[in-house]
Image: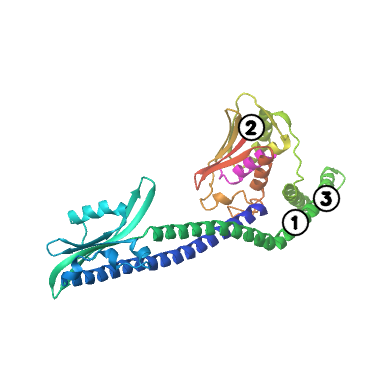
Amino acid sequence: MFLEFKQKIVKDYTFFTSILLMAISLSIYVTSFYMSYKEQLSHIEMLAIEESEDLFYKLNDNGLKNLSIKEELTTEDEGYFARIFVYGFDIRHDVVFEHNTLEWSKSFMEKAISQDLLEYDKVYFKFELVDNRHLKLFTTMRYPLIEQQKFLGEVYVGIEATHWAREQVRIFCYLVLFNLLARFFIRYVAYRMANKAMEPVVQSFEQQKQFVANASHELRTPLSIIISGLEVLKLDDDNKLSPFSRDVMGDINDEALRMKKLIDNLLITARNDNKTLRVNKNLFSLNDILTKLYNKFFLLADRKNIKINLNLIDDISIYADKLHIEQILAILIDNAIKYTEENGKINIKVQKQKQEVIISVIDNGKGISKEDLPHIFERFYRAEKSHTDYGNGLGLSIAKILAEKNNGKITVESEENIGSCFNLVLKI
């Protein structure tokens, strides 16, 4: 129980902390990417403006018109100019100057220029696959030269941005790797914190379990003596008790039996928690148990004018703890009688499916609400709280424990004011 709870704490803490860390990391990355992206845009816009100014001077100075760009380069500029390209055109669309050492970009630029594919003042990002191996990226822009509202020419400029793109991908990969490693660290911290937080809870629960086990065990002996003493008094012909005294003695006996049942259930629960609950498996007839229980509960049902129908099939032998299976079925039938109104009906039927046998207890009683249905197997949970004489909320919890100890399970289908169907599924 605590292991599942601790795992849930660790899981939830890890999940929410990881999501928070991922959101923060992603926000930082998006912000830095946006700033870097704006820088790329600003860079190419500045290049376009500079080259348009150069175009203006070249158009207005014949001496500059035929000047090769290589003559303008210095050694320091070679690295920069190796990553850019420039095309300058006059108003007649004649080439004024051209510089492009990025061979892989030429085919696209020639097509873009000849077919007028690019809009003015708009930055384009273009990926090119070089030699079917390397993916290259460049940014390009078409910028008009306008002087005194007169169109004089235009420039096409571009910058290789492959390094920038790789850097962004590398940062993103580092970010993902960081979050993955951080998740393991967060999980480790969460596990340590959960262990620390659960220590006093586990210790308190262990003490409680031990107390319940000891108290239940110690109470059984005096209670058995009380019940035996009451039985002796009933059989003693010499005692001359008044009718009132006999009624009181009967009430005491009934309450003692109820207390004994509660103590037995608490003891089963405590032994299950301490993993000391014994299971004595043997081969026995299922029909014998069902017939015995039918005879046992027939009179109890008859008092409320409830009809019990027992539908048996060919006798089936079950390998399990006979007392456990009998107790499970007794709990299910007893609950069906308690929660079925007078003149109701209860069906007990057996089905065989492959390597399983299903014993169903079906009633047309009050049913269980959708809100209560997920909790009915919890300890001390009472779906019907308005009737305090309906038990202590341990019956179905005990039934589930015993079923699981015998490699079985209990399923339930119920609808309010229509009835319930409890199925005990056992392996043959």
- Residue 415 percent location from the top left of the image: 50, 46
Q: Residue furthest right?
A: 238
Residue 123 visible in rendering: no
Q: CA distance from mark 3 to mark 1?
A: 30 Å
Q: Residue furthest top?
A: 314
Closer to the camera in the image, 333 or 343: 333
Helix, strand or loop at mark 1: helix
- Residue 56 percent location from the top left of the image: 19, 71
Q: In this rendering, which labeled residue sits more in front, label 3 or label 1?
A: 1
**In terms of sequence position, does the residue under pointer 3 or pointer 1 come before the other?**
1
Q: Which residue is mark 3?
A: 226
Figure quadrant of residue 62: bottom left
Closer to the camera in the image, 300 or 170: 170
Q: Which residue is mark 2?
A: 427
The type of residue carrying mark 2 is: Lys
Q: Which residue is mark 1?
A: 206
The type of residue carrying mark 3 is: Ile
Q: Are marks 3 and 1 in contact (CB under 8 Å)?
A: no
Crowding at dot 2, Cα within 10 Å, few <14 / some 14-19 / many 20+, comes out as some
Q: In this rendering, which labeled residue sits more in front, label 3 or label 2?
A: 2
Crowding at dot 3, Cα within 10 Å, few <14 / some 14-19 / many 20+, comes out as some
**In terms of sequence position, does the residue under pointer 3 or pointer 2 come before the other?**
3
